[in-house]
Amino acid sequence: DLRGGRADIVVRAEAMRGQVALQPGAAMQAMATEPLELRVTSDDFAQGVRITGATSATVGNQPAGTLSIAATARGVLDAQGKPITGLPRSLQGQIALRGMTTALVQPFAGDMINLTQDVGPTLDLNITANTLESATTTGATASGATGAAAIPPTDLDIAASAQYLNAAAALRLEPTAI
């Protein structure tokens, strides 16, 4: 029974140093990331857990972006105090990328878009999740589903901005639809 249990867990990925060519045929440039430290804390697992983390990168000794994560998950234990399977009953949090050099992720976009030319040299991306409070009180969805099938309705707000991009999406995740 983990009710009343406490934790302060730190997972750390050390700093990385290397070289990267941001365009095919371009000269190699120094690239570095700061250590990524993810921290999971709880004063009482029955009340939930908090997850935080941050890191940043540089390319050619110039800022190439920052990443931050801050989230709280509730309903991570079942009625007997055992860890649940599936998603927590409630999630509030944010993941933010600021000033990310788009050329760094160009390999993931392939040839369908040139991120630096079509989006801009840097990108800000913000993703916020918020489980609807009315769904968190019963531990089940409106359909009566429980356990892993009871994905509580959760609003996702996504915003991306760059030199040639301003986009926002408001989505609701539900057990049977987005």
Image (tube, rainbow, N blue to C red):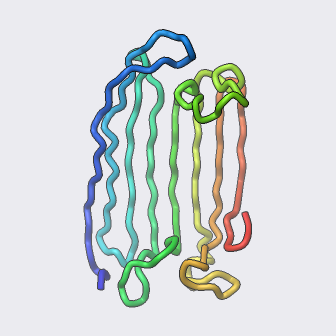
Residue at the spot x=33%, y=59% of the render? 40
Q: Indicate left or right for 82 with 67 as reference.
A: left
List x then y, in percent, for residue 166: 71, 34
The answer to which quarter of the image holds residue 152 is bottom right
List x then y, in percent, for residue 148: 55, 78
Instruction: Name the one closer to the observer, 23 or 122.
Output: 23
Disc tally is 0
Q: Is residue 138 above or below residue 48?
A: below
Q: Is residue 40 above or below residue 176?
A: above
Q: Indicate left or right for 94 with 119 as reference.
A: left
Look at the image and tell me in which quarter the N terminus lies: bottom left
Residue at the spot x=65%, y=43% of the render? 159
The answer to which quarter of the image holds residue 140 is bottom right
Instruction: Name the one closer to the observer, 74 or 60.
Output: 60
Q: Is residue 151 above or below residue 19?
A: below
Q: Indicate left or right for 144 with 52 as reference.
A: right
The answer to which quarter of the image holds residue 55 is top left
Look at the image and tell me in which quarter the C terminus lies: bottom right
List x then y, in percent, for residue 62: 43, 18
Q: Is residue 75 above or below residue 172?
A: below
Residue at the spot x=39%, y=57% of the render? 51
Instruction: Name the one closer to the observer, 13 or 95.
Output: 13
Residue at the spot x=44%, y=20% of the render? 20
List x then y, in percent, for residue 169: 72, 49
